[in-house]
């Protein structure tokens, strides 16, 4: 893999005389969301990201678009209401990468009484004022259930599943379509105030070359690095201290049949999700622990794997152990919270702070993938006085790139008629990843031979070239783990072959 964190000694510097409206630091979901909203309102936007888009927290989530049922226990009714309203917007605007997901919640009487769970689900339904998903209900588990025979009563409700990293990429594409510049592998190394403007120096993390841009305002949306960026790059402004909370997940071979997900309660009052993942796997998570130190070094600990295995094995007939774990990942949330709260109790809501003394700086703390678009609208409201000429909010009714269709089934049928030679499994994956952008992948191709080399697991040269040209990918990690999730199916030899192809293209 290529080094994503550093680069050779600086060899040259370029100076750009253009004055941009907004310079955004951070290519996670919050950064690209603000970039898209701002560009769509007519602002001149530049976004810089040190690594790849969604290379940290935004690709290490539980892959859910949800209100957050468990947040009701912490009385975060406003957050849940916001998230449930946004769930409906996103299901409509991104039907390729966001789909309804049915959850089953087995009841264990010694953990929470039945009436409490039923009341919580009733409130969850009530707070979703524009609900298109089925309402919650009580259920009984029969002998065919994958759960242990002692678990015969539970509840069912619906939320949404999302391909989190693809969501970030598609929102970045939306921003680009409105004129935003998306600059990946460009690290912001210095930002100074001068004559009411920001003078921002970006460093190419591969070549080491630097350039200086000017911007009227800066947004610090660096996620877990928001405090580090504030203290080392934006040194002329005060900043808040944040709390880093690490969440870890494991992936195992498919644990049960059926497309339902499970919400598993534990005696420590936390919950663990078991979710169907990429057809042949089950995603299990998450842990929640405070993290101290460099967010880039966050990794799952052995005890966290043991914890997730223990909770899972207490519910399912099929038992799993460490040997079954095929993939792990850890994400880090930057939160503002009280010292006396546990990591699982810390609020997932976002905080926006605008410092307009001198050149304006907007800092973003916290947030959830589900509410990224609302966060972006709130950010632009904060900046209204800085950019009074900008247009009104627009993104609520705007489909994300590739999302201009009704249902995956209908789109699949249309594409199947147009491209009958494409294998069923491949077309299914493309529809769920690219939606109508599949037409761009297939443009001018009439046979399987036109797709070029198959690197493995149905990944063809044509798709790789599309990702390089249109989606800012440049390494095998970008392609296999963030753009396609095919890393779960690739052998080491296939990874090497893909990396060699990418190096030859570079």
Image (cartoon, helix red, strand yellow):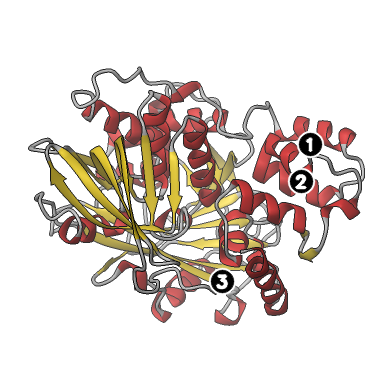
Residue picked out by circle 3: 327
Q: Position of residue 178 (x, y in %)?
A: 48, 29
Distance from the alpha carbon under mark 3 to that under mark 2: 23 Å
Q: Is residue 382 above or below residue 205?
A: above
Reading the image, the residue beneath label 1 is 412
Quarter holding the N terminus is bottom right
Q: Residues within 10 Å of mark 3 (few under 14, many from 20)?
A: few
Q: Find residue 356 and report its horizontal and vertical position in percent.
A: 12, 35
- Left or right relative to 217: residue 417: right
Task: Answer yes or no: is residue 155 visible.
Answer: no
Residue 307 at what x, y percent from top left? Answer: 42, 73
Task: Return the mark for residue 343.
Answer: none
Relative to 255, say whether 304 is above or below. below
* N-terminal label among 2 and 1: 1
How many C-alpha atoms fall within 10 Å of the one at disc 2: few (<14), some, or many (≥20)? some
Q: Residue at x 43, y 59 (%)?
A: 185
Secondary structure at badge 3 equals: strand
Residue of label 2 = 428
**Residue 253 shown left or right of residue 8 in the figure:** right
Is residue 172 visible from the viewing direction of this image? yes
Q: Are marks 2 and 1 in contact (CB under 8 Å)?
A: yes
Q: Earlier in the sequence, mark 3 or mark 1?
A: 3
Residue 410 figure quarter: top right
């Amino acid at each position: 893999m290529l080094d994503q964190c550093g680069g050779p000694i600086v060899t040259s510097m370029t100076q750009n005389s253009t004055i941009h409206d907004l310079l955004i630091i951070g290519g996670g979901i919050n950064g690209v969301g603000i970039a898209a909203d701002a560009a769509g309102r007519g602002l001149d936007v530049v976004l810089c990201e040190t690594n790849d888009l969604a290379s940290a927290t935004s690709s290490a989530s539980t892959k859910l678009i949800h209100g957050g049922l468990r947040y009701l226990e912490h009385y975060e009714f406003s957050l849940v209401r916001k998230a449930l309203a946004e769930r409906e917007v996103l299901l409509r605007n991104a039907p390729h990468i966001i789909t309804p997901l049915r959850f089953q919640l087995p009841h264990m009487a010694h953990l929470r009484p039945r009436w409490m769970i039923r009341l919580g689900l009733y409130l969850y339904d009530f707070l979703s004022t524009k609900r298109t998903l089925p309402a919650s209900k009580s259920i009984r588990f029969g002998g065919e259930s994958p759960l242990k025979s002692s678990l015969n009563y539970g509840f069912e409700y619906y939320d949404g599943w999302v391909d989190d990293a693809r969501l970030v990429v598609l929102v970045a594409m939306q921003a680009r379509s409105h004129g935003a510049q998306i600059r990946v592998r460009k690290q912001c190394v210095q930002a100074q105030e001068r004559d009411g403007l920001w003078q921002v120096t970006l460093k190419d993390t591969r070549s080491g070359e630097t350039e200086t841009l000017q911007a009227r305002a800066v947004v610090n949306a660096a996620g877990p690095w928001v405090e580090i960026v504030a203290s080392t790059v934006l040194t002329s402004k005060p900043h808040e201290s944040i709390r880093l909370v690490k969440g870890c997940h494991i992936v195992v071979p498919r644990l049960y049949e059926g497309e339902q997900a499970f919400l598993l309660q534990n005696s420590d009052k936390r919950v663990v999700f078991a979710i169907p993942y990429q057809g042949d796997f089950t995603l299990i998570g998450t842990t929640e622990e405070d993290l101290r130190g460099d967010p880039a070094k966050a990794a799952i600990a052995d005890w966290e794997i043991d914890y997730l295995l223990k909770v899972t094995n207490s519910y399912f007939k099929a038992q799993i152990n460490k040997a079954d774990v095929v993939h792990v990942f850890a994400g880090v949330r930057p939160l503002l919270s009280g010292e006396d709260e546990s990591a699982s109790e810390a609020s997932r809501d976002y905080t926006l702070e605008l410092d307009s003394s001198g050149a304006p700086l907007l800092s973003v703390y916290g947030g959830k993938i589900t509410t990224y678009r609302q966060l972006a609208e709130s950010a632009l409201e904060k900046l209204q006085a800085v950019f009074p000429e900008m247009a009104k909010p627009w993104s609520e009714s705007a489909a994300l790139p590739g999302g201009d269709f009704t249902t995956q089934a209908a789109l699949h049928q249309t594409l199947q008629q147009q491209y009958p030679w494409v294998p069923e499994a491949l077309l299914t994956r493309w529809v769920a990843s690219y939606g109508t952008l599949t037409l761009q992948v297939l443009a001018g191709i009439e046979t399987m031979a036109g797709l070029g080399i198959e690197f493995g697991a149905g990944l063809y040269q044509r798709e790789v070239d599309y990702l390089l040209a249109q989606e800012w990918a440049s390494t095998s990690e970008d392609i296999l783990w963030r753009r396609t999730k095919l890393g779960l199916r690739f052998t080491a030899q296939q990874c090497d072959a893909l990396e060699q192809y990418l190096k030859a293209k570079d």
